Amino acid sequence: MRTRLLPLLLVLLAGILLALGFPLAVSVAAAQQQRVVVDRIDDTARFAALAQFVTERTESGHDERRRTLEAELASYYAVYGIKAGVFYRDQWAMASAPEGWAVPESGEGLEAFEEALYKRRSHDPPQVWPWQEGRLVVASPVVRDGDVVAVVVTDSPTGPMRSRILRGWLVIAAGEFAAMLVAVGAAFRLTGWVLRPVRVLDAVTHDIATGLMNSRVAAAGGPPELRRLARSFNEMADNVEEVLEQQRAFVADASHQLRNPLAALLLRIELLSLELPEGNEEIASVRTEGKRLAQVLDSLLGLALAEQATTHLQLIDIGDLVTERVAAWRPLADDKGVHLTREGPAAVTAWGDPVAFSSALDAVIDNALKFTPGGEDVTVEVVPNGETCTITVADGGPGLTDDELERVGDRFWRSNRHQNVSGSGLGLSISRALLLPGGGTMSYARNEPRGLRVTLTVPRTGPTA
């Protein structure tokens, strides 16, 4: 979920930062240009003050003032590299630097000159961006006795200004990048804080779905809504566990209570068979059904006890237990003509309840021998796999179809093709119930070329790891 939520937050934050950064960058560029324009206005005002009394071309008395103005313009151009000039209304140069520089014949310079003739300072020039090779032209009128007698024009290069704009933009970009890093860290913390209860809830839900009914959510973190959801979930799990406990108690009590009447009934059937002719088919049928019912009751009681049993986890030698159980079942396999073999390393340690594991493995081997005809093989293989250990029981029986593989292990389920084989349909369910409290699992697959593979998986790391 974080992989979907985090990009959305980052895109939103990036959009906000860009929305703030673009206007800021534009304002920085505008401020830098306005600063240059104001400086040029001040310069043109100073030159206009010097040029006020140098207005007639033929008055020799003003030669000294003209020379002073020319010296100021030349020094200004030499120091700042800014072209400057004072021009009469007919664009004749009173003084200019560099020498010979004239009013542009078109473009922004001419427009600024014409606006100054009407006693108006030229409009602010268009914004110059760092990637543009533009110049700034500013013009101011020279007024004497209320009339415009000349115009001061400056033509500034924009290289230094564009450099300052670019440096300002780099500072903004660095600030945006730092803000984005902080936002990413905050988004990680925020999504972790929000999604941590969701992950815990998902894990606990999976545990309960696989049978670990004592799993609960620690409602201590995340938004208030998720903490309230965790508490509601725990209440629901408590109610479900209570109902299941009542169901298990009922099954155990019913199985236990029915065993005595059934035993008495079977005893009466045996006594009745003594009064009837030997080989009576009805008596034989009733006796068979009675024994089958007793087997079902025993299986029900075993399942109830397996689900309620307390697990004593310890480090055990799985390899030795498997060898022991295979040796115990080998006489029955030999009687049926089935080749029961054990494969894998002799010593493999894992964590589990030795009694529960042995009982679960017995049920799986019993199921394999029950459906494997004589002359076929049943193989029990032990394979250590890092943090787990798998015990695979592969038989040579008829196997199951894909649809049947989805239902194998369900309580009381038996394949329609195997109804003639004795059993209650609870053996594999009991095995799974025995393995589950210790963290073990069971899975089923086809055994090529035929048969069924039942895989028991137990952890090799302890509960404190």
Image (tube, grey):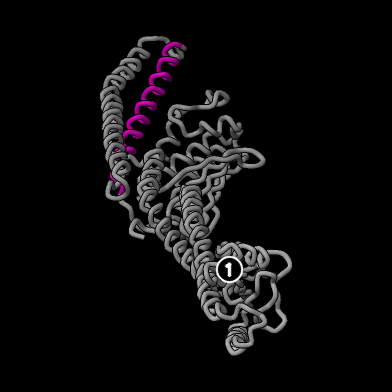
Residue 412, percent from left and from top: 44, 27
Quadrant where the image shows the C terminus? bottom left
Q: Is residue 225 visible?
A: yes
Residue 410, percent from left and from top: 46, 31
Q: Residues within 10 Å of mark 1 (few under 14, many from 20)?
A: some
Determine the residue positioned at 54% across, 72% down. Answer: 144
68 above or below 184?
A: below
Residue 56, percent from left and from top: 63, 79
- Magenta stretch holds residue 295: yes
Secondary structure category for the residue under label 1: strand
Determine the residue positioned at 43% across, 13% down. Answer: 278
Determine the residue positioned at 39% across, 9% down. Answer: 276
Left or right for 3, reference 245: right
374 above or below 17?
A: above
Left or right for 144, reference 259: right
Magenta range is 282-311
